[in-house]
Image (spheres, rainbow, N blue to C red):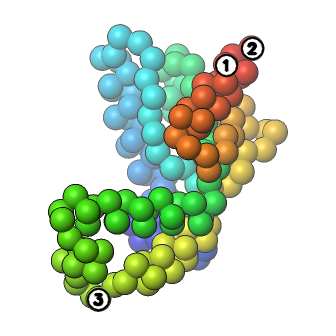
C-alpha cells in the first residue's frame, strides 16, 4: 500500500488493487465501529480518486448509514507550509534549534529547504476534484484557518441535507 500511495502522490502509475483492499478493510473497521456507536460518526482520511470515494460510499451505505463525503481542497504549497510549521514547533517544544531537531529527526542531513522541496514534489498530485456525478459529496476550500474550514464543512453538509 505504501508503494502504491507514494507512486500515486508522485504522479506515477500505481496499483489500484492495493487501494481497493486498503479502503475495503477500512470500511470493515468503520462498519464494525458504527454498529457499536450510539449515533453519527466522522471518519477522516485523504481519498485521492473518485472511484475510491464511490467504493467507500457504497460499502458504508450498505449498513443503512447516511454517508457524506467532504473533500477538503488545499494547495501543495499550503500543505507544505503547514508541515514545515509543525517541524518548527516540534523543534521549539524540545528546546532545540531547527537544525538540531532536523539532525536528530532526519539522519540523512535534511534541511528545511530540502524537506520543503520533497514535500512539494510529494504533493504534486492532489485528490481528484468533485464532479457533478458524485452523490453526497461536497468540496470545501481548506486553505483558510481551521475554524473557517470547520464552518464551511458544516455549511456544505447542511446544504446536502436540504
**Residue 7 located left or right of residue 131:** left
Q: Which residue is drawn at 34% across and 65% down?
A: 87
Q: Is residue 105 above or below residue 39?
A: below
Front residue of 3/43: it is: 43
Give residue 93's position: percent from left, percent from top. Answer: 22, 58
Residue at the disc numbered 3? 109
Q: In this view, does 159 lie above or below 44?
A: above
Give residue 48's position: percent from left, percent from top. Answer: 58, 54
Q: Is residue 54 above or below residue 60?
A: below
Front residue of 85/153: it is: 85
Q: Is residue 89 in view?
A: yes
Give residue 13's position: percent from left, percent from top. Answer: 58, 74
Q: Give how far apart the Cα atoms at labels 1 and 2 are.
A: 6 Å
Q: Cβ–Cβ below 8 Å for labels 1 and 2? A: yes
Q: Give how far apart the Cα atoms at labels 3 and 1 are.
A: 48 Å
Q: Is residue 49 in view?
A: no
Q: Is residue 90 above or below residue 41?
A: below
User: Which dot, 3 or 1, sits closer to the camera?
Assistant: 3
Local SS, label 2: loop
| Residue 162 numbered mark, or none | 2
Local SS, label 3: loop
State the quadrant of the C terminus.
top right
Residue at the disc numbered 1? 158
Q: Residues within 10 Å of mark 2 (few under 14, many from 20)?
A: few
State the quadrant of the N terminus.
bottom left
Q: Residues within 10 Å of mark 1 (few under 14, many from 20)?
A: few
Dot 2 or dot 3: first in sequence order is 3
Amino acid at each position: 500500500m505504501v508503494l502504491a500511495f507514494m507512486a500515486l502522490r508522485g504522479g506515477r502509475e500505481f496499483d489500484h488493487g492495493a487501494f481497493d483492499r486498503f479502503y475495503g478493510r477500512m470500511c470493515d473497521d468503520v462498519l464494525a465501529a458504527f454498529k457499536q456507536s450510539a449515533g453519527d460518526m466522522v471518519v477522516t482520511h485523504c481519498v485521492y480518486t473518485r472511484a475510491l470515494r464511490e467504493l467507500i460510499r457504497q460499502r458504508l451505505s450498505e449498513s443503512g448509514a447516511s454517508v457524506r463525503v467532504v473533500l477538503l481542497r488545499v494547495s501543495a504549497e499550503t500543505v507544505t507550509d503547514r508541515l514545515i510549521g509543525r517541524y518548527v514547533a516540534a523543534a521549539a517544544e524540545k528546546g532545540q534549534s531547527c537544525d538540531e531537531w532536523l539532525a536528530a529527526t532526519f539522519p540523512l542531513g535534511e534541511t528545511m529547504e530540502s524537506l520543503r522541496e520533497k514535500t512539494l514534489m510529494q504533493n504534486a498530485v492532489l485528490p481528484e476534484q468533485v464532479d457533478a456525478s458524485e452523490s453526497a459529496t461536497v468540496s470545501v476550500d481548506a486553505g483558510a484557518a481551521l475554524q473557517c474550514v470547520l464552518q464551511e464543512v458544516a455549511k456544505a453538509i447542511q446544504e446536502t441535507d436540504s
